[in-house]
Amino acid sequence: MFSHIVVGSNDTEASKRFYDATLRCLGYGEGHQMESGRTLYNYGKGVFFAFTPPLDGAPATAANGGTISFSAQSPEQVDAWHAAGLAAGGVNCEDPPGVRDFGGARMYLAYLRDPTGNKLAALCLISD
C-alpha cells in the first residue's frame, strides 16, 4: 500500500546514527545520505524510508498521534531494535517491550521516539 515514509529531522547526524542502529537490527543496510541531509533506506521495489531536514526551512516536529511501525521477524529482533535505539539516542515511550493483544491480533511490540521526537514501533505477529 505504501511506497515510502519520510520523517523530518533537526539533526541529520543524530538521526543517521539512530536509524542505522535500529534498522540494522531488522536486517536493513546503512542509509544513503545525500548532500542535502536527506537519507534513504531502500527496501527494494520502490519502497523506502527516509528522513530529511524540512524543505520549507522550518524546524521538524513529530506527528501528534502518529506512529510509524517497522516489521520484525521475532521478539528478539524487536528487543534488539529497542536496545539499539536507546543506545543511539532514542527515548523510550509507551509501555516496555512486550506482548499486546489488539482485538485478537497478538503481537510483540516496542516503542521509541527518535532524536526529533517521531514515535516509532517495531513489531512481530505472534501465533498461538
Image (spheres, rainbow, N blue to C red):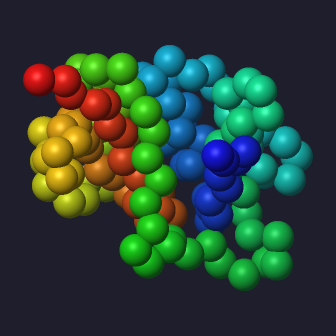
Q: As drawn, which residue projects farthest toward the right? A: 35
In this orientation, which residue lies closer to the viewer: 77 or 4?
A: 4
Residue 98 on image: x %, y %: 13, 39
Q: Is residue 62 visible from the viewing direction of this image?
A: yes
Q: Does 53 sit above or below residue 88?
A: below
Residue 97 on image: x %, y %: 17, 41
Q: Quadrant of the C terminus?
A: top left
Residue 82 placement: quadrant: top left
Which residue is drawn at the image coordinates 28% and 31% (left, top)? 125
Q: Does 58 sit above or below residue 2?
A: below
Q: Does 40 sit above or below residue 29?
A: below
Which residue is drawn at the image coordinates 22% and 42% (left, top)? 105
Residue 3 placement: quadrant: top right
In this orientation, which residue lies closer to the viewer: 116 or 23?
A: 23
Which residue is drawn at the image coordinates 77% and 50% (left, top)? 38
Residue 55 placement: quadrant: bottom right
Which residue is drawn at the image coordinates 65% and 78% (left, top)? 59
Q: Is residue 21 visible from the viewing direction of this image?
A: no
In this orientation, which residue lies closer to the viewer: 12 or 96?
A: 96
Q: Does 76 sit above or below residue 116?
A: above
Q: As drawn, which residue projects farthest toward the front? A: 104
Question: Disc count in the image?
Answer: 0
Residue 58 on image: x %, y %: 72, 81
